[in-house]
Amino acid sequence: MAFITIPIFTRLLSVEEYGIVSVYTTFVGIFAIITGIDLHASIGTGINDFKEKKKEFLSSVLFLSLLSFISVFIIIYIFRELLSNVFNIESNILIFSVISGYFAFIFNYYITIKVFEKNYKVKSLLSLLKAISTVILSIILVIIIKNNKYFGRIYGELIVGIIISTILFFLILAKGKKIIWIKAWKYSMLIGVPLILHNLSGIILSQFDRLAIQKIIGSEKVGLYSYAYTLGMIPLIILGATNLAWVPWFYDKMYENKKEEIFKKVKYYNEIFLLLLLLMFIIIPELGIIMAPKNYSTSLIILPIIIASYYMQFLYTIYVNFAFFYKKTGSISFGTLLAGIINIVLNIWLIPIFGYEIAAITTLISYIFLLLFHGINVLYNLNDKTITPKYILGFAFLIISFSLIQYIISKYFGMFSITERISRILIFGSVGAIVGIKIYKKSKNLFKGDFI
């Protein structure tokens, strides 16, 4: 929905206002993690370990998140002026982001329950309802508000989030009828709290570049950068959808100790995702011309780097799911924190020198380290050799190399020049053809019952 509405909001909002909304969205993501202290991460294993009292477990853990939210809100409210000066953001926007973040957590908590219950119809319909309602209300409010139209986008998300998540909150509590359960609280906190650093570091990896650009250069450049990132987010949408289906299946196979089958399916999973990704490399830049006014187009040069970063995210999730299964959330946080620190240092160092474009490259570098850290963690710390590093790193090197080559060509010959367009089609089209043929051969073996 964020992708579909690009042509609407890039025309209703100025580049600067678009940048402010992007920064607000970043803070919503941060506070969704902090206020909920990542308690939803305990759902996958909790509904198995508390099988006889699953509903009571879920309601008590959700109530614990409410206590956490109240504590965080009080602290942020007291220091709102200081924080707004540090991050160059209005204090009221900061407060709105805390509230919106917690209600986003509640929504994700309920969605996670439905994922592990394998009730995808409810999950999908509810997500669609929220997305459409948010967009419609935001458009109406942006049109009505005369000055500071970005508040229309913020209010739309906030109002819909409060209404839907409040209903879901009381629905979970009504089913469980238990709000205080120390055993469940300890269990969920042991899994969720160590992940706070991991997920905050994930936000740093994906969003700190925008905060750095906002602080160092200004909201207008954030708007340009955010447009390119939102335009290139189709791989992330695919990853989010496929990972929701992959994780419950993966957990089932891990419990059954069918690791050979996991690796076989990982190959198929990766190559189908890669084929879609290569198609995105070719098509998305052309969509960028028509999805927003011309003054946004200067940022499209960084699209190959952005799409490559999303592929690194995909490969990293393959490894990190093993650590989630083994409940080794501390090691997950450590690896992601290191990658986040690299991202912070590179952005603060290089953005003032090279401008906002370099932030795409620093983010790609950080995601490469993220993949390496989590690969090493699974292979050597958890001692699980299900996924061979040669297979994963080979594909990573291929996409990184081609995306950097395409970026250099775009930089030297100009975006949408004949040379740039031909190279984009030849490079990614030829690799896509090879991957497509490989998938076709595998699918023939699959239907013959000889899938390798």
Image: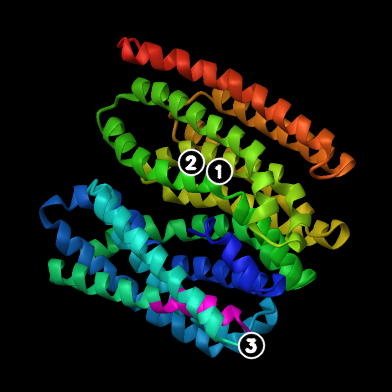
- The span from disc 2 to disc 1 (Cα, nearest Å) is 6 Å
> Which residue is most to the left?
52
- The span from disc 2 to disc 3 (Cα, nearest Å) is 42 Å
Q: Secondary structure at mark 2?
A: helix
Amino acid at circle 3: Asn
Judging depth in this view, the residue of 383 and 35 nearest the camera is 35
Q: Is residue 44 above or below residue 274?
A: below
Q: Secondary structure at mark 1?
A: helix
- Residue at the spot x=33%, y=71% of the render? 65
Which is more foreground, mark 2 or mark 3?
3
Give the residue pinned by disc 3. Answer: 147
* Badge 1: residue crowd in 10 Å (few <14, some 14–19, many ≥20): many
Amino acid at circle 2: Thr
Give the residue pinned by disc 2. Answer: 317
Query: What's the image's color scheme?
Result: rainbow
- Residue at the spot x=30%, y=72% of the render? 64
- Start and end of the magenta stretch? 148-159
Which is more foreground, mark 3 or mark 1?
3
Q: Is residue 151 magenta?
A: yes
Amino acid at circle 1: Gln
Q: Secondary structure at mark 3?
A: loop
Numbered circles on residues, count:
3
In the rendered image, which quarter is residue 129 located in?
bottom left
Q: Is residue 142 found left or right of 328 in the rendered image?
A: right
Give the residue pinned by disc 1. Answer: 313
Q: Position of residue 262 (x, y in %)?
A: 37, 26
Determine whether label 2 and label 1 are within 8 Å by CB: yes
Judging depth in this view, the residue of 411 and 204 nearest the camera is 411
